Image: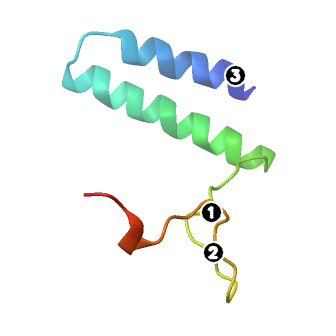
Amino acid sequence: MANEEWEKVKQALRKPTTPEAMREAAEAFERYRVVKLAKGKSSKPTLVTLGRGRGYPNAVPVDKIPE
C-alpha cells in the first residue's frame, strides 16, 4: 500500500511546477506518510548519543581536525 502511495507522490512531482501541482504533490506525500506511519515501520535516525560517556567509536576530537 505504501509503495502505491509513493508512486502517486512520484507522479505528482513529475508534473510541471504550478501551485495546483505543488498542492497535489503535498497531498499525495501526506497520504503516503499516513499510510507509512500506520504500518509502524518508520525509522528515525539517532543524531546524538544520550548515554553518558558513550561516544562514537570513529569520532575525531575537535582539536585534531585539520584546517
Foreground mark, 2 or 1, reads: 2
Residue at which label 3 appears = 3
In the figure, is residue 40 to the left or right of 48? right
Q: Label 1 is placed on what type of residue?
A: Thr
58 versus 5 height, above or below: below
Foreground mark, 2 or 3, reads: 2
* Residue appearing at x 59%, y 34% in the figure: 32
> Whole-Å distance between the Cαs marked 2 and 3?
32 Å
Q: Label 2 is placed on what type of residue?
A: Thr
Residue at which label 1 appears = 46
Image quarter hosting the C terminus: bottom left
Mark 2 residue element: loop
Corner quadrant of residue 20: top left
- Foreground residue, 36 or 20? 36
Q: Label 3 is placed on what type of residue?
A: Asn
> Whole-Å distance between the Cαs marked 2 and 1?
7 Å
Corner quadrant of residue 1: top right
Rendering coords of residue 19 (x, y %) = 20, 26
Q: Are marks 2 and 1 in contact (CB under 8 Å)?
A: yes
- Foreground residue, 45 or 56? 56
Rendering coords of residue 17 (x, y %) = 22, 17
> Whole-Å distance between the Cαs marked 1 and 3?
25 Å
Corner quadrant of residue 18: top left
Residue at which label 2 appears = 49
Q: Which circle marks residue 54 in the picture?
A: none
